[in-house]
Image (cartoon, rainbow, N blue to C red):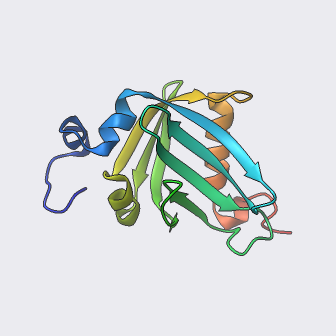
Amino acid sequence: MSAGSSAPPAERRAQGSPARILAVVAIIGSFERHPDLGCEGVVFLDEDSDACFQLLRDLPGGPRAGEYCVTTGASAPVYGGVVQWRRVGDDRFEFALAPRAARLFGDEVLSFRVVPGSGTTVAELAEHVERLLAGPGDYPGSRD
């Protein structure tokens, strides 16, 4: 929520905030694993505007393997940036963001229709999101 705004997120999106773009177009979602970079993540990309929402986590054994972060792909990471998430229907994801992440993305809620990239499904993307957001004890490899 922007400072001084009392409008609910849906009304602010209707007034033209960046989240509105994410809410009205299909976003391509993909899972990426980069052993060479020591991380994995789910990347949501609006190909028309190049707007990007990334949910990333170090691979097990990495310095921050017990934490996830969100980023635009060009911004610094915001650790713990998602307060809550849900899947709405078959193909819509909604993320309620912590204040610092909300400032980065221009709204406290991101809601968008997901079109899976090649080689994956919406259900698989949802499973990856769930796993990446899991607490350290729930993350595969965190007990190794």
Judged left or right of residue 17, residue 89 is: right
Please state the total of marks drawn on the protein image. Answer: 0
Residue 2, given in percent of the width and then of the height, sits at: 22, 58
Give the residue furthest to the right. Answer: 144
Residue at coordinates 67% horizontally, 72% vertically from top-left?
Answer: 64
Residue at coordinates 79% horizontally, 65% vertically from top-left?
Answer: 60
| Quadrant that contains the N terminus | bottom left
Residue 131, given in percent of the width and then of the height, sits at: 67, 50
Q: Can you say whether 42 is above or below 66 in the image?
A: above
| Quadrant that contains the C terminus | bottom right
The quarter holding residue 19 reads top left
Judged left or right of residue 110, residue 7 is: left
Residue at coordinates 71% horizontally, 30% vertically from top-left?
Answer: 120
Residue 142, given in percent of the width and then of the height, sits at: 78, 66
Q: Can you say whether 118 is above or below 34 in the image?
A: above
Pick the front one: 74 or 29? 74
Judged left or right of residue 119, residue 144 is: right
Give the residue furthest to the top. Answer: 90
Residue at coordinates 50% horizontally, 58% vertically from top-left?
Answer: 74
Give the residue furthest to the bottom. Answer: 63
Residue 39, given in percent of the width and then of the height, sits at: 72, 59
Judged left or right of residue 113, residue 4 is: left
